[in-house]
């Protein structure tokens, strides 16, 4: 059986992340995500297949086995607990905790992991709203509705913001678009234009597709109260 090294954990975590977002996992996609060559990915995939960590449903696609998913969830749990600890205990900005947790996640022992979890009060989600896998039992990675699909006139509760782009994360945070915020979707500009939203501060902002696709949550029933009877306005108040 192949021992699960830090390098293998990195691969498993990326495969899990891609799969949870409904993206097809191929060697080319993994090479791009991890910043390595396709031959390097192919060599690692042979090791993962030998270790019964991944399978190939077809000639191109890769999929985690139960053993592979369990190993991925262990490192995802450590990563998200570290992000939460860095943000809560040390005040590290939410757009920086991901990179720091990447450096620490492989060195965290089971004992220290549990101490951090207990010290934080057993949090359910990290600073970005990502659910923290439990030590034991089932885990739900559901992403919810994307802001990109929210219709004009609705309210939208932010539950998760992807941490894949730290610059975008910093910008969204500055606008007040964080987990728990309720946005009012006021207008969708035609021909692929931006989606205009009003944030909790009352300011109005135009968000393009690359930003709205990073924000996930729940489309709330009923029209936004502040929008009712108002004609859409352009610009930020």
Image (cartoon, helix red, strand yellow):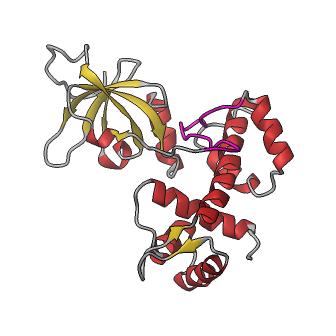
Relative placement, left or right, of 154 versus 216 is left
Residue segment shown in magenta: 122-137
State the image coordinates of residue 46 (x, y, percent, origin top left). 61, 83
Q: Quadrant of residue 43?
A: bottom right
State the image coordinates of residue 53 (x, y, percent, origin top left). 62, 70
Residue at 49% x, 33% y: name it: 173
Residue at 57% x, 72% y: name it: 54
- Relative to 218, is 70 above or below? below
- Relative to 13, is 230 above or below? above
Q: Quadrant of the N terminus?
A: bottom right
Q: Quadrant of residue 214?
A: top left
State the image coordinates of residue 133 (x, y, percent, origin top left). 62, 44
Residue at 21% x, 18% y: name it: 227
Relative placement, left or right, of 194 versus 119 is left
State the image coordinates of residue 185 (x, y, percent, origin top left). 27, 28
- Relative to 3, is 93 above or below? above
Main SS category, magenta section: loop
The stretch drawn in magenta includes residue 41: no
Q: Nearer the viewer, residue 1 or 122?
A: 1
Q: Quadrant of residue 158?
A: top left
Q: Quadrant of the C terminus?
A: top left
Q: Nearer the viewer, residue 147 or 233?
A: 147
Relative placement, left or right, of 41 versus 107 is left
């Amino acid at each position: 059986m192949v021992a699960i090294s830090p390098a293998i954990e990195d691969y498993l975590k990326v495969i899990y992340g891609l799969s949870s977002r409904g993206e097809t996992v191929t060697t080319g996609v993994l090479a791009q995500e991890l910043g390595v060559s396709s031959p390097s990915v192919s060599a690692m995939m042979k090791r993962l297949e030998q270790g019964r960590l991944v399978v190939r449903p077809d000639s191109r696609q890769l999929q985690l086995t139960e053993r592979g998913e369990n190993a991925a969830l262990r490192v995802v749990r450590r990563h998200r607990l570290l992000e939460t600890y860095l943000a809560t205990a040390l005040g590290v900005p939410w757009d920086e905790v991901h990179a720091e947790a990447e450096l620490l996640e492989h060195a965290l022992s089971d004992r220290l992991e549990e101490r951090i979890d207990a010290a934080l009060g057993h949090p359910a989600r990290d600073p970005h709203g990502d659910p923290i896998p439990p030590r034991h039992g089932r885990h739900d990675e559901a992403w919810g509705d994307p802001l990109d699909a929210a219709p004009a006139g609705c309210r939208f509760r932010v539950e998760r913001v992807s941490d894949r782009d730290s610059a975008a994360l910093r910008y969204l945070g500055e606008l007040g678009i964080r987990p728990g915020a309720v946005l009012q979707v006021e207008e969708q500009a035609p021909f692929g234009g931006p989606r205009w939203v009003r944030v909790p501060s009352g300011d109005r902002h135009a968000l393009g597709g690359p930003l709205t696709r990073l924000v996930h949550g729940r489309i709330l029933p009923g029209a936004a109260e502040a929008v009712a009877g108002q004609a859409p306005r352009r610009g930020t108040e």
